[in-house]
């Protein structure tokens, strides 16, 4: 292929992605190989690619591509989540633009519009993932509301209901007044907001000149007050025990109750108890048998029970009632106050605690095996630090409110008659049979009587209006994507389940990950996956979470267009330590693009070499070194992958390619300008480059596939692609050889430093004298040192060389004879600076080794490493002191 001076991702990415798709490289079918399976955390159909998706899916693709190259049957199942609240909001907005109101539509008409919206916009994010290079098995794409998956949700509900795990009741829920639906605790985002603290006077009944003051942030709820609560140990209010007060403006009498729940040092030490509008107040109300007065409509406006300000929005009512209280002399003062408020994750509306008739799933028994799996190591949370959080959640699990007041979603399979009696059944016909069974439990009806009963009941039968929480479908995801409910013994579920790894965000650890584990045990009798890799949050360089509202989140597709998919993938992973937040800056993507160009230029260099078959190989030492260095790096990379340290694995790979291969190995073996190279060196170099491409492919799929097909790697068949090429396997590494080369590199670096400081031309060859104090055989490295350091001759001496620029590498001394007089004073200053540094370094090492806690707790190899540092520093100090005495 023709080689341009720079790598052009635009000319490469669509070409190879289409090729991979056409050759079916992403598709998996069960066979005799070891399966490696990942199910994608299904993004919302409303979604477009954001930086969190970029990170999450890059990690998954790296893992799936590596497994594929390792010969495993890699299967990455993609799909999308129907996202009830978010999607319904999008559809309502679309209808509004068309001049249509949801309330004017039937459920069937609305659902038709919703499916229209889904078909038009629901696949955008999956197409964007293809731009990133995601090698999902697109033939297996699933959607949580497709027929088979919806049927699984309905069957699951009925199964759990029949086991007594699902019930219907009035409970305090998180109410979203904008979405007009209940939401789970996990869908509530806590934010610190600036508020006002209103100090309101409640007149004591029978004592017109006596009152107590209550501090509240929500004066608009005083109409729902059922009591004022004081702490029984609060001496300030002893005289009020057993008395009543009047609610301001309403003059309705309520009791003063006592409970040690009240904090004496907050506000005034008095608490207004509003059971209908606060969870803690509700529990106090149950304990003290208080009435529940719900003054809010579903949309957050005040209803008739409020008596005043009826129809006003809750926040408008707050301002207005403050004025009314002040005018009536009931407002003592107002203070600025900051507190945490819950907001709906989907609509960003302030959440209202609300008593509501909902469907709930009992979680206590379901949680037990899911907790045990993590605590006993059957499932690994990575990083492990999340285990304690998981344990706390699971040990304090609450029943799950699974109903939502929406139309888009799987409808609750409950059916009501004209008297509001209800049964749970999959179809209307089954519901009629269930009502018949209740009416005639002993089956004494004749067939004619039974049919008559059902015929009479049918017109009155209506299905529950609510749908199920979206998470009630996605907790089944690892099973349902393989049709494990429809056909529980099919070849796919038996082969791919349990899956291997799950990559997701910590914020959904409980309400998705934990619930999938629960579902796995309930419906398959086993865990759904083995490892859960929890990514960090993508933040900007100032540490702020990326968001549209802050305007600090770049467009991922724009980044790909600017830096190439490979550059963006590398950039994302370079700043993504396992389990910690990612401090993203666009410069990382630029670094990724530069890395791609570095690889491209290395390839151009090698491809430009002419070969002379008659030449002997002068590079045996360099070739042996890089072979061992590659094995050493590969072992470290494998160790990082095993610990799910993908960022570290990439960094080791990056340094291997940029430093060891490009900066050192290629410089060691490349021929003199316009001269040919021997065939053995070229063959070895091409072989190493091929292995490097294989090592890089999971991180940089497009560039590596492009280079893989060049003729220097031999003829490639249409299925001979790097995506399915063998992943490199590490061999033994000669530690002594590697250590020697580090010394050689140190020598070359010091010679180059002397040239820089003395402003000598790199073309000027210099003689090098070596005083060897170790057992290192520098003679065999003379060709490498001579070539890279431009050394004219290398001599071994017994004494120091006077008048030469001197340096040390390890224990050995090196002297570069210059055609100038050495500035003795300047050399003394340099040596003394080195001496001060080494003495300080030795002091820090001694402090560490004298620390008993360090010595007792550190691994033996770490302690030995510190001792080696100490010995090395002491040796260098002795040689510098000897050099100083000779000047």
Image (tube, rainbow, N blue to C red):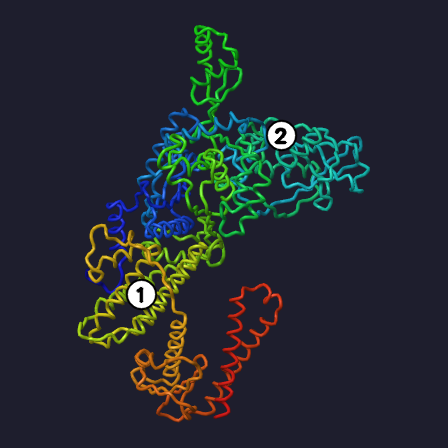
Residue marked by disc 1:
598
Above or below, comparing residue 610 to residue 410 in the picture:
below
Cα separation, mark 2 vs mark 1, equals 73 Å
In screen coordinates, is 631 left or right of 290?
Answer: left
Quarter of the view holding residue 819:
bottom left
Work out whether residue 881 or residue 116 is closer to the camera in this orientation and state it: 881
Residue marked by disc 2:
308
x, y (%) of residue 884? 50, 89
Above or below, comparing residue 739 to residue 267 in the picture:
below
Q: Earlier in the sequence, mark 2 or mark 1?
A: 2
x, y (%) of residue 189? 53, 43
- Secondary structure under badge 2? loop
Work out whether residue 480 or residue 570 is closer to the camera in this orientation and state it: 480
- Residue at position x 51%, y 67% from top? 861
x, y (%) of residue 122? 36, 38
- Secondary structure under badge 1? helix
């Amino acid at each position: 292929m023709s080689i341009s001076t720079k790598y052009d991702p635009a000319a490469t990415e669509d070409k190879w992605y289409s090729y991979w798709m056409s050759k079916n490289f992403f598709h998996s079918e069960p066979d005799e190989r070891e399966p490696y399976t990942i199910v994608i955390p299904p993004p919302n159909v409303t979604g477009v690619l954001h930086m969190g998706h970029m990170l999450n899916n890059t990690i998954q693709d790296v893992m799936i591509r590596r497994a594929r190259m390792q010969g495993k049957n890699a299967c990455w199942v993609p799909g999308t989540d129907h996202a009830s609240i978010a999607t319904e909001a999008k559809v309502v907005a679309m209808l509004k633009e068309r001049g249509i109101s949801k309330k004017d539509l039937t459920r069937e008409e609305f659902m038709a519009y919703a499916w229209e919206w889904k078909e038009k916009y629901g696949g955008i994010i999956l197409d964007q993932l293809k731009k990133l290079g995601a090698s999902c098995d697109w033939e297996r794409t699933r959607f949580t509301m497709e027929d088979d998956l919806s049927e699984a949700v309905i069957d699951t509900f009925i199964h759990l209901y029949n086991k007594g795990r699902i019930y219907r009741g009035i409970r305090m829920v998180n109410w979203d007044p904008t979405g007009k639906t209940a939401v789970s605790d996990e869908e509530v985002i806590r934010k610190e907001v600036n508020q006002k603290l209103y100090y309101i006077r409640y007149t004591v009944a029978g004592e017109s000149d006596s009152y107590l003051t209550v501090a509240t942030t929500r004066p608009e709820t005083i109409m729902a007050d059922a009591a004022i609560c004081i702490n029984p140990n609060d001496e300030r209010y002893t005289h009020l025990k057993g008395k009543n007060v009047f609610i301001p403006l309403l003059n309705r009498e309520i009791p003063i109750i006592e409970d040690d729940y009240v904090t004496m040092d907050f506000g005034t030490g008095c608490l207004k108890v509003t059971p209908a509008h606060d969870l803690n107040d509700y529990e106090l109300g149950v304990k003290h048998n208080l009435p529940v007065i719900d003054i809010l409509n579903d949309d957050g406006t005040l209803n008739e029970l409020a008596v005043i300000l009826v129809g006003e929005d809750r926040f408008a009512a707050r301002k207005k009632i403050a004025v009314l209280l002040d005018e009536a002399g009931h407002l003592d003062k107002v203070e600025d106050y900051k507190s945490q408020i819950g907001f709906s994750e989907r609509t960003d509306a302030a959440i209202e605690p609300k008593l509501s008739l909902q469907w709930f799933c009992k979680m206590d028994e379901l949680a037990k095996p899911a907790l045990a799996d993590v605590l006993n190591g059957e499932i690994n949370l990575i990083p492990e630090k999340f285990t304690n959080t998981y344990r706390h959640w699971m040990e304090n699990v609450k029943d799950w409110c699974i109903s939502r007041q929406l139309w888009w979603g799987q409808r609750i399979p409950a059916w009501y008659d004209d008297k509001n009696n209800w049964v749970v059944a999959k179809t209307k016909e089954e519901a009629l049979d269930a009502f018949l069974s209740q009416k005639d439990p002993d089956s004494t009806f004749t067939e004619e009587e039974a049919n008559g009963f059902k015929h009479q009941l049918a017109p009155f039968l209506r299905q529950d209006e609510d749908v199920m929480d979206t998470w009630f479908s996605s907790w089944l995801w690892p099973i349902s994507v393989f049709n494990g409910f429809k056909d529980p013994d099919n070849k796919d579920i038996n082969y791919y389940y349990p899956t291997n790894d799950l990559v997701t965000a910590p914020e959904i650890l409980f309400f998705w990950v934990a619930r999938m584990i629960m579902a796995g045990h309930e419906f398959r009798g086993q865990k759904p996956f083995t490892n859960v890799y929890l990514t960090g949050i993508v933040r900007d360089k100032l540490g702020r979470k990326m968001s549209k509202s802050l305007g600090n989140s770049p467009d991922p597709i724009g980044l790909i267009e600017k830096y190439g998919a490979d550059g963006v993938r590398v950039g994302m992973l370079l700043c993504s330590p396992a389990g910690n937040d990612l401090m993203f800056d666009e410069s990382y993507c630029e670094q990724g693009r530069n890395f791609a160009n570095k690889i491209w230029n290395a390839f151009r260099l090698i491809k430009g070499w002419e070969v002379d078959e008659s030449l002997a190989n002068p590079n045996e030492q360099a070739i042996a070194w890089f072979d061992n260095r590659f094995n050493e790096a590969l072992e470290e990379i494998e160790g990082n992958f095993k610990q799910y340290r993908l960022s570290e694995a990439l960094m080791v790979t990056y340094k291997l390619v940029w430093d060891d291969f490009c900066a050192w190995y290629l410089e060691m073996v490349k021929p003199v300008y316009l001269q040919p190279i021997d065939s053995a060196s070229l063959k070895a170099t091409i072989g190493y480059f091929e292995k490097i491409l294989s090592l890089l492919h999971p991180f940089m799929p497009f560039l590596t596939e492009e280079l893989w097909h060049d003729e220097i790697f031999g003829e490639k068949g249409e299925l001979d692609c790097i995506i399915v090429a063998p992943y490199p396997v590490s061999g033994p590494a000669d530690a002594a050889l590697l250590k020697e080369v580090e010394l050689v590199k140190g020598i070359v670096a010091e010679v180059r430093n002397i040239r820089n400081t003395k402003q000598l031309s790199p073309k000027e060859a210099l003689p090098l004298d070596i005083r060897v104090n170790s057992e290192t055989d520098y003679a065999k490295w003379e060709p490498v040192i001579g070539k890279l350091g431009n050394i004219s001759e290398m001599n071994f001496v017994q004494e120091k060389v006077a008048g030469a620029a001197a340096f040390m590498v390890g224990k050995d001394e090196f002297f570069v004879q210059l055609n100038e007089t050495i500035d003795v004073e300047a050399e003394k200053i340099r040596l003394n600076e080195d001496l001060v540094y080494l003495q300080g370094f030795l002091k820090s090492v001694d402090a560490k080794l004298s620390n008993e806690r360090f010595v007792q707790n550190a691994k033996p190899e770490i302690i030995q490493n510190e001792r080696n540092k100490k010995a090395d520093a002491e040796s260098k100090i002795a040689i510098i002191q000897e050099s100083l005495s000779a000047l």
